[in-house]
């Protein structure tokens, strides 16, 4: 669970169907440029807007690429309810090296309810879990104490921490040195979290600039602080542009412009982005490229 894992978009054809050829090309692009692994069926992949058959096609396509490259495949799972989350986990575990399971959203259960939720999913699935803590979307805040209790579960191999800041809970989580992976979930905060001892990140922006994100993680690991900081400073405007409209609209448009996927299409209620953020992302990408070539 170390390094930068690229959170993949799900490409569609111009007529709105799954584009498995573009997906395979994107997956290869990320791994060949240095990503440590792939993440599919997350929010970036518009998983909630895919049919069951489409989800299976995404899994099978990316599983084949991951096997070919000898890299892990992390698969998104989980809903607001425990029983349907268990059903998803069982369906997807056979093609996953780990399951990225979101903290139950909207209902805002008690902390013990959250712990019981993950324990039940872990007991039902035969692959490790990575809880996805993103309180600004789920509406459920978990203290550092509860996060550490989550990490103490045998079924949990790490956590995706997406607090929207390097807040006090994140600092305590990183300082605890549990031996399990703390993965940055906010693209802009990957660098400081790596510097504070994070194992890596799950990063949508790495679809577009996998080599730069991998180089930044490597520079932190090797103690090359000047290079790591220079890459962070160059990648920050890229992440800002990519997330300036609801993700993954800008990211898909930039990937299509670069020929990595064929179409920038997103599914409703997402909408095609304005031209300005796409242009800003591509301009930032050009600046990043000068640092790694």
Image (tube, grey):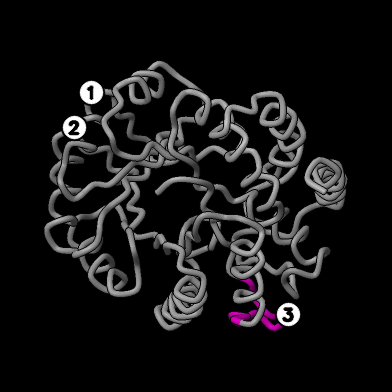
Q: Is residue 53 above or below residue 118?
A: below
Q: Is residue 7 above or below residue 263?
A: above
- Depth check, mark 1 against mark 3: the one in front is 1
Q: How far apart are the two marked residues, 1 and 3, measured between alpha carbons?
A: 47 Å
- In what element is the residue under mark 3? loop
Percent across and percent down for residue 169 are 36, 21
Q: Earlier in the sequence, mark 3 or mark 2?
A: 3
Percent across and percent down for residue 22 are 66, 76
| Drawn side of residue 206 relative to residue 74, left or right | right
Q: How far apart are the two marked residues, 1 and 2, measured between alpha carbons?
A: 6 Å
What residue would you read off at disc 1? 145
- In what element is the residue under mark 2? helix
Instruction: Tell me where residue 183 sits by quadrant.
Output: top left
Q: Is residue 216 magenta?
A: no
- Depth check, mark 3 against mark 2: the one in front is 2
Residue 36, labelled with which disc? none
Q: Earlier in the sequence, mark 1 or mark 3?
A: 3
> Contact (CB < 8 A) between labels 1 and 2?
yes
Over which residues does the magenta segment extend?
A: 11-20
- In what element is the residue under mark 1? helix
- Residue at the location (54% across, 37% down)? 186
Residue occupying the far top of the picture: 168
| Drawn side of residue 238 relative to residue 148, left or right | right
What residue would you read off at disc 3? 14
Query: Dot 1: within a 10 Å radius of its alpha carbon, few (fewer than 14), some, or many (20 or more) residues?
Result: few
> Contact (CB < 8 A) between labels 3 and 2?
no
What residue would you read off at disc 2? 149
Kindly report the secondary structure that dominates the magenta region of the rendered protein. Answer: loop
Percent across and percent down for residue 111 are 19, 32
Q: How far apart are the two marked residues, 3 and 2, measured between alpha carbons?
A: 46 Å
- Residue at the location (54% across, 62% down)? 45
Q: Is residue 93 above or below residue 155?
A: below
């Amino acid at each position: 669970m170390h390094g930068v894992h690229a959170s993949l978009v799900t490409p569609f054809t111009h007529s709105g169907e799954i584009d498995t050829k573009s997906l395979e090309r994107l997956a290869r692009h990320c791994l060949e440029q240095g990503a440590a692994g792939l993440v599919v069926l997350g929010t970036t992949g518009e998983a909630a807007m895919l049919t069951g058959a489409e989800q299976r096609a995404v899994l099978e396509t990316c599983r084949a690429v991951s096997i070919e490259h000898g890299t892990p495949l992390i698969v998104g799972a989980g809903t607001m309810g425990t029983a349907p989350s268990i059903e998803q986990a069982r369906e997807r575990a056979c093609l996953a090296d780990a399951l990225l399971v979101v903290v139950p959203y909207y209902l805002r259960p008690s902390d013990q309810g959250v712990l019981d939720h993950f324990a039940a999913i872990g007991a039902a699935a035969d692959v490790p879990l990575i809880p996805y803590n993103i309180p600004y979307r789920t509406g459920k805040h978990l203290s550092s104490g509860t996060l550490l209790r989550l990490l103490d579960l045998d079924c949990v191999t790490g956590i995706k921490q997406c607090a929207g800041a390097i807040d006090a809970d994140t600092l305590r989580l990183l300082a605890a040195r549990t031996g399990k992976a703390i993965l940055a979930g906010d693209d802009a905060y990957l660098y400081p979290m790596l510097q504070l001892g994070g194992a890596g990140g799950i990063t949508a922006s790495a679809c577009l600039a996998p080599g730069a994100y991998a180089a930044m993680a490597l520079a932190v690991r090797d103690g090359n602080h000047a290079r790591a900081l220079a890459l962070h400073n160059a990648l920050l405007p890229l992440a800002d542009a990519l997330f300036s409209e609801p993700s993954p609209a800008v990211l898909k448009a930039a990937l299509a412009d670069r020929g990595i996927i064929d179409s920038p299409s997103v599914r409703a209620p997402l909408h095609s982005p304005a031209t300005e953020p796409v242009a800003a992302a591509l301009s930032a990408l050009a600046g990043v490229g000068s640092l790694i070539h």
